Image (cartoon, helix red, strand yellow):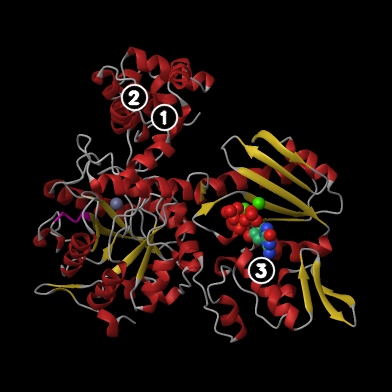
């Protein structure tokens, strides 16, 4: 059991106790312990070995015992008892973004509401607005939250799905002879959420592959075990399909099962008009009632048979890519190797796990030429945001790390909070000392659309702001984006020469694909950043690049593909007027 999973169980115990109306101090202790464990600088097992579990905030002897039980057995009896006492339907309500245990308890006690359906009904009927602490706005949030849960609830996050798929593919490869193997479906298209994992294998003999698949370590349940197709439920709760096809059909099957369905439907229509038939076995020319096979081993053959250039899986959503392929104007999509730096990460100075030197070494290992260390500003108390004094003290550590890790430029940077009124959380003279400034909204989510839009635009009007971090604040499956007029924000970004972030963290992917595409149309520069809270999270860049590719983004649209010298010129500051404004016309 990972430390994050231990934290998850403790936080669930806290929620269950709260629903039961138990002692608030006890509940607080579970919440604090969960929070502390989720942000530990050290592994839980090491802390346990040192006999220091009780030094973790919130952890007394009873919680310490439960942590040990979880580490040893992967389960906790107290947790399981509570789960039995609280109906599953009540527990499900906690999965609605914005609905916590306090609200659930209120709903049960005052209205007898114990299911999502009853809650939705009550919210629509307007009976919740009179409950203490609620109003019409809360009702609307609950309705939106339920819709969000229905859309994302059963789907896995892209990062978790890739971790599961990579594990499955490695184990398969180690056990049986496979010719070729690839992920297909939404996973290959790098969609922000994944319904199920699709894996494709080319092999002359399907049976041993199937036997191996249903016997994998990660299998929690075998849903179907067939000759050429099987389905499993993984321990991680994500379903996976495996199909085995003969090698001469691999390209055809890969194209078919990559989808999207809409993309494939349009391809088949084009085929019908030119007497070409496509299916998962191959591509065929139809003449006088006879089918002649003309390809299927390679995926490109499926497209070339229709006179189309092959296109990246990320584009296959029927959003104009087929027309673009036909007219020879497909974008030259950005690739991972185009990235020369990472422009958002957190060190031990705020809420990160690794120090600045560690981050720089990892970045150098990835071949980067620069990084921006963007610890939080003072308003982020729970994330250990830096006072002006600590920010200045950090400069010395940055200088030491620059000497220790030559070859990577370490930018003295910040992720500064945008306060409710749009004012930044550091004064101008402090921001002026920095090399790069990301500004983000971390509080006051529930503002109305107009106020939120004005808030963000005001922040961009500061001459010191280079980039807006995770511009909609969403946490996929957990928190709705705040309400904001994205079109107005993007127009302002173009006018003011401020970059918009594509946050690569798989829970965020923010800007999302369609917004990134619109930003590009408006001439806004993008910054693809990981928001890493540890050195190993710098590897999350692939999800940001994939999101950019889904938004038709090319290397030239992205700030952190610039070589260091050009990047520096682009964000250079002048003493009187702040950063030299590129704006739309000069943003080359
Ligand atoms: P997901 O799993 O909901 O995240 O999305 P996908 O796209 O992975 O969908 P999935 O797993 O149901 O099917 C994988 C691919 O197989 C899909 O993208 C296109 C293809 N496919 C599945 N069913 C159909 C179908 O009825 N018609 C066509 N044309 N293609 C299909
Ligand atoms: Ca799928
Ligand atoms: Ca599937
Ligand atoms: Zn942030």
In magenta segment, residue 422? no
- Quarter that holds the C terminus: bottom left
- For this orientation, the residue located farthest to the front is 125
Q: Which mark is residue 19?
A: 2
Please name the predominant secondary structure of the magenta segment in the image. Answer: loop
Is residue 184 visible in the rendered image? The answer is no
Q: Residue at x 50, y 67 (%)?
A: 550
Q: Residue at x 36, y 17 (%)?
A: 63
Give the Cα separation between the discs numbered 1 and 3.
41 Å
Q: Residue at x 19, y 56 (%)?
A: 418
Is residue 258 visible in the rendered image? The answer is yes
Q: Which mark is residue 376?
A: none
24 to 312, vertically: above or below = above
Q: Is residue 92 left or right of residue 421?
A: right
- Label 2 packing within 10 angstroms: few (<14), some (14-19), many (20+): many
Q: Earlier in the sequence, mark 1 or mark 2?
A: 2
Q: Residue at x 23, y 55 (%)?
A: 414
- Label 1 packing within 10 angstroms: few (<14), some (14-19), many (20+): many
The residue tagged 3 is 264
Q: Nearer the viewer, residue 156 or 2?
A: 156
Q: Is residue 242 left or right of residue 519?
A: right
Queried on whether the Cβ of the residue with tag 3 lies below 8 angstroms from ligand 1, the answer reads: yes
Residue 476, given in percent of the width and then of the height, sits at 42, 50
The residue tagged 1 is 90
């Amino acid at each position: 059991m990972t430390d994050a999973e231990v934290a998850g169980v403790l936080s669930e115990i806290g929620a269950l106790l709260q629903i039961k109306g138990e002692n608030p101090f006890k509940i607080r202790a579970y919440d604090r312990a969960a929070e502390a464990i989720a942000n530990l600088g050290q592994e839980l097992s090491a802390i346990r070995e040192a006999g220091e579990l009780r030094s973790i905030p919130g952890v007394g002897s009873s919680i310490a015992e439960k942590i040990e039980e979880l580490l040893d057995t992967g389960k906790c009896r107290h947790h399981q008892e509570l789960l039995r006492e609280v109906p599953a339907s009540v527990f499900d309500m906690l999965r609605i973004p914005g609905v916590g245990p306090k609200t659930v308890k209120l709903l049960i006690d005052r209205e007898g509401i114990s299911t999502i359906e009853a809650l939705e009904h009550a919210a629509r009927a307007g009976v919740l607005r009179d409950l203490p602490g609620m109003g019409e706005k809360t009702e609307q949030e609950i309705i939106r939250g339920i819709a969000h849960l229905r859309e994302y609830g059963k789907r896995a996050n892209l990062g978790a799905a890739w971790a599961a798929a990579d594990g499955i593919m490695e184990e398969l490869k180690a056990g049986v002879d496979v010719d070729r193997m690839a992920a297909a479906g939404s996973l290959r298209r790098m969609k922000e959420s994944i319904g199920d994992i699709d894996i494709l294998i080319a092999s002359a003999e399907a049976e041993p592959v199937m036997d191996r698949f249903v016997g994998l370590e990660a299998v929690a349940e075998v849903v179907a075990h067939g000759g050429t197709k099987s389905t499993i439920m993984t321990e991680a709760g994500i379903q996976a399909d495996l199909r085995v096809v003969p090698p001469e059909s691999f390209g055809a099957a890969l194209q078919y099962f990559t989808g999207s369905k809409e993309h494939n439907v349009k391809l088949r229509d084009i085929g019908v008009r030119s007497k070409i038939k496509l299916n998962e076995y191959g591509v065929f020319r139809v003449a006088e009632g006879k089918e002649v096979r003309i390809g299927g081993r390679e995926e490109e053959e499926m497209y070339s048979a229709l006179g189309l250039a092959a296109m990246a899986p990320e584009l296959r959503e029927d959003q104009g890519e087929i027309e673009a392929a036909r007219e020879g104007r497909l974008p030259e999509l950005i690739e991972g190797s185009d990235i020369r730096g990472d422009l958002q990460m957190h060190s031990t100075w705020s809420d990160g796990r690794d120090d600045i030197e560690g981050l720089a070494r990892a970045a150098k290992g990835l071949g980067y030429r620069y990084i921006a260390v963007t610890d939080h500003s003072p308003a982020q108390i729970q994330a250990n945001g830096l006072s002006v004094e600590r920010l200045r003290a950090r400069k010395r550590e940055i200088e030491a790390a620059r000497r220790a890790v030559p070859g990577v430029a370490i930018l003295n940077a910040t992720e500064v909070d945008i306060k409710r009124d749009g004012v930044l959380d550091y004064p101008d003279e402090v921001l002026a000392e920095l090399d790069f400034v990301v500004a983000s909204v971390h509080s006051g989510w529930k503002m109305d659309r107009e106020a939120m839009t004005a808030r963000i635009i005001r922040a961009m009007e500061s001459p010191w702001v280079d980039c807006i971090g995770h511009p909609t604040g969403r946490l996929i499956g957990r928190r709705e984006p705040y309400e904001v007029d994205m079109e107005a924000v993007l127009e302002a970004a173009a006018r003011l020469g401020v970059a918009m972030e594509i946050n690569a963290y798989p829970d965020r992917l923010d800007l999302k694909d369609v917004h990134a595409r619109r930003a590009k149309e408006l001439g806004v520069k993008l910054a693809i950043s990981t928001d890493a809270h540890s050195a190993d999270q710098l590897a999350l860049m692939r999800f940001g690049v994939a999101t950019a590719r889904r938004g038709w983004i090319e290397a030239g649209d992205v700030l952190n593909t610039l070589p260091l010298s050009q990047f520096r010129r682009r964000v250079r500051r002048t003493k009187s007027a702040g950063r030299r404004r590129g704006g739309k016309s000069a943003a080359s």
